[in-house]
Image (cartoon, rainbow, N blue to C red):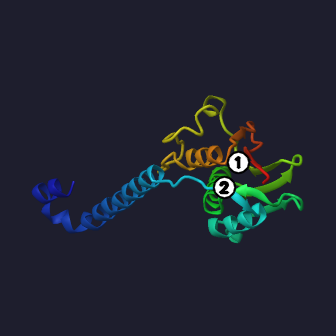
């Protein structure tokens, strides 16, 4: 566009130059972000689970995730079980898992036009298993997308890389478990739930 304008209508070149260059820089930044995400996924270190506090990890993850803007009315609810610790986890990888789920929940809820509400829950199912859930009040996951949400590079978000939930699935598997989806279609929001083992 710049080349054509300079050749055919040079008097307008100064007018369109700022807009065109801003667009180019935005696209370069977006591509840099995507490349960075792909590289991070490829280099993701293997988890090394050891006895630790899931409650501490959840609190730290939520603080690091950020994104809760009071002006926008976004709210976060923590419902952490008193009897869940200790569990076997890699603190760094589990922090990434929770951050990704919270970020995903915020983004899903933000698309509804109403204040986002995210609930993070931990509870002991029995003497050996602890459950972690992250639920949102977004539109839920469409039936045709349910089997693909954990597939690398699958995304419905503009500018998304499709790696957030793929990373979640990999980290969960490295902790000896998996993450399941309750799609909550019909405006009920989606819930992602995973399980951890006790030492």
18 displayed left or right of 30? left
Give above or below for 74 relative to 146.
Answer: below
| Residue at the (51%, 41%) spot, across then down | 152
The nearer-to-camera label among 1 and 2 is 2
Q: Is residue 66 visible?
A: yes
Give above or below for 169 relative to 98.
Answer: above
Compare residues 71 and 143 and report the one nearer the observer: 143
Q: Few, some or many C-alpha atoms within 10 Å of disc 1 (few <14, some 14-19, many ≥20)?
A: many
Q: Which residue, given by chain and number where applicable, does mark 2 sit on? A: 49
Furthest toward the left, the residue is: 7
| Disc assigned to residue 138 | 1
Coordinates of residue 187 in the picture (x, y in percent): 75, 41
Compare residues 115 and 91 and report the one nearer the observer: 91
| Residue at the (62%, 47%) spot, across then down | 174
Coordinates of residue 129 in the picture (x, y in percent): 82, 47
| Residue at the (19%, 58%) spot, across then down | 2
| Residue at the (67%, 64%) spot, across then down | 61
Looking at the figure, which quarter contains the C terminus?
Answer: bottom right
175 displayed left or right of 199? left
**Lower position in the chain sequence, tag 1 or tag 2:** 2
Q: Are marks 1 and 2 in contact (CB under 8 Å)?
A: no
The alpha-carbon separation of the residues under discs 1 and 2 comes to 32 Å
Indicate the quadrant where residue 176 lies: top right
Indicate the quadrant where residue 177 lies: top right
Compare residues 32 and 68 and report the one nearer the observer: 32
């Amino acid at each position: 566009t710049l080349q054509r304008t300079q050749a055919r209508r040079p008097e307008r070149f100064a007018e369109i130059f700022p807009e065109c260059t801003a667009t180019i820089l935005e696209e370069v930044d977006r591509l840099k972000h995507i490349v960075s995400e792909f590289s991070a996924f490829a280099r993701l270190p293997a988890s090394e689970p050891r006895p630790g506090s899931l409650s501490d990890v959840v609190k730290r993850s939520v603080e690091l995730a950020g994104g809760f803007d009071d002006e926008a009315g976004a709210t976060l609810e923590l419902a952490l079980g008193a009897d869940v610790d200790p569990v076997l986890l890699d603190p760094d990888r589990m922090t990434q898992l929770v951050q990704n789920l919270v970020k995903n929940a915020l983004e899903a809820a933000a698309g509804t036009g109403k204040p986002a509400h995210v609930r993070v829950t931990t509870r002991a199912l029995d003497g050996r298993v602890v459950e972690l859930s992250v639920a949102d009040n977004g539109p839920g996951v469409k039936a045709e997308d349910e089997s693909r949400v954990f597939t690398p590079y699958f995304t419905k978000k503009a500018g998304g890389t499709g790696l957030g939930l793929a990373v979640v699935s990999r980290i969960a598997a490295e902790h000896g478990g998996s993450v399941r989806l309750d799609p909550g279609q019909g405006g009920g929001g989606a819930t992602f739930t995973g399980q951890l083992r006790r030492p």
